[in-house]
Amino acid sequence: MYLECLNCDGESVNSEVKLKKKLFCDHYDKEIRPGPSSDVTKVNFRYTIKSFDYDENEKIFTVTAWMTLVWIDSRLSWEPSEYDDIKTIHMNIDYIWSPDIYLYNAHIGSGLGLCHAVDCLITAKSKVACVMPCEHIGHCSKGVYTNWPFDRHYCSFMFGSWMKSGEQLNFNEDKVKVISSKSRQNNQWKLLGTSVKVNEGKYDVSPNETYPSVYLSYLIERHSAYHIAGTIVPAFILMLCNVTVLWMIAEGIERFMLPFCGDSVPNSVNYFKDSHIISVVLLIETITLRVFIRRSTESHAYLWITNLVKTATTNRVGDFLLTSSSPEAEDVTDLVENVKKLSSNQMIWITFCKLIDRVIFTIIMIIYIIMFMSLLPEDNPTLSVEFCATSMKPLEVLKTL
């Protein structure tokens, strides 16, 4: 222990060593709360956010912060004039009494928060201040996606004493603060605001005791250049195309049709049109397969389906098509157990649906390759001449020469 290294029985001429021996060798017990047992130990709480991250899939909010705790320990006081005018000393938090402040609503598996043991500042007037670098992981409520990609999410942390009631340890409400540091910003999320509130902690199960806590609220908003480029820019271009039409003359046919010399539709337009058609076909296919899977528990597979599945599973082409696309992601043990639970009829329907997926996948891949090739420029373009339609008669054309 530190006190053993301090050598309480030895003599020293160093004033700081003498002071620490006087404070910690004379019946100091870090397990005992400072002051009379009837008094309440008041704690100043300040939470300085250094960086944060948000996992929107798991709704997990991770914060790296400096948690500052300040309290009074009447056992740690001295006259500076007796110790070469020493007004402050440092002592590691592991060797002094400290408030047991933890994160109540921590994410399961992350503990109550990870805070590193640091040296605390102790003044001659019994004030103890510790600034601990911590990492806390908590949950966020359901986000509001109405304004995506500028959606907002609300997260909260609740800190409090793990073992002591409000009659033993409490917070100074006017000294509870949360501060956001701009030293490290998140690339995708922006911290719009924070708020702090001290809950008195009255509960029906313990009417004679209180369990106060500090409630920190965070409001974050998505600010991702990738999402903005994929949504805001196309939306602006569509708006620009629509409003530009209003500046054309009303009788101009360009407002509602292609010009006479441009009756061919651009390949890029055909690409997106055909992609939408493919999306509709895939949606219909998904619904159809869903119906087949439900029928697997109610009716037997048709004979031609059974023969098709047997044929597909007994040749190399079918074996290749029915191979799992990501074998690493599957648990072999669970897969075997699931197969055992399924009847042969259900396995036929499931294999049939899987075969349909693979065949359609192959067909669509070929279609997309052809569609993509149409977007590439031609290496040897052929010269074609098109004549614009005209309402002039041949005689009128000759007169213009």
Image (cartoon, rainbow, N blue to C red):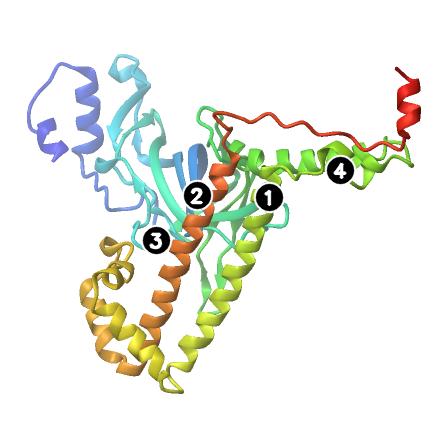
Relative to the observer, which residue lies in front, 20 or 113? Answer: 113
The tag earlier along the polypeptide, 3 or 4, is: 3
**Relative horizontal placement of residue 91, taking residue 72 as reference (left or right):** left
The image quarter containing residue 10 is top left
Instruction: Pick whichever of labels 2 and 4 is earlier in the sequence.
Output: 4
Whether residue 173 is situated above or below residue 327 in the rendered picture: above
Relative to 238, is 347 above or below?
below
Work out how far the residue at label 2 is from the one at label 4, CA to CA, in angstroms: 28 Å
Q: Give the residue at x 47% y 25%.
A: 379
Q: CA distance from mark 2 to mark 1?
A: 14 Å
- Neighbour class for label 1 at 10 Å: few (<14), some, many (≥20)? some
Q: Residues within 10 Å of mark 4 (few under 14, many from 20)?
A: few
Label 1 and label 4: CA atoms lie apart by 15 Å
Which residue matches tag 2?
369
* Mark closest to the chain's N terminus, 1 or 4: 4
- Does the CB distance between marks 3 and 2 fall below 8 Å? no
Q: CA distance from mark 3 to mark 2?
A: 62 Å
Label 1 vs label 3: CA separation?
65 Å
Q: Which residue is mark 3?
A: 162
Which of the labelled discs sits on residue 258, or is there none? 4
Please name the residue that numbered disc 1 is placed on: 270
* Mark 2 secondary-structure assignment: helix
Query: Where the N terminus falls, by quadrant?
Result: top left
Which mark lies nearer to you, 1 or 3?
A: 1
- Residue 135 image point, x, y percent: 35, 39
**Amino acid beneath label 1:** Asn
Query: Residue at (29%, 78%) from the top-left corner?
Result: 307
Residue located 46% across and 65% down the image: 208
213 or 123: nearer the viewer: 213
Q: Where's the C terminus, which quadrant?
A: top right
Q: Are marks 1 and 4 in contact (CB under 8 Å)?
A: no
| Badge 4 amino acid | Leu
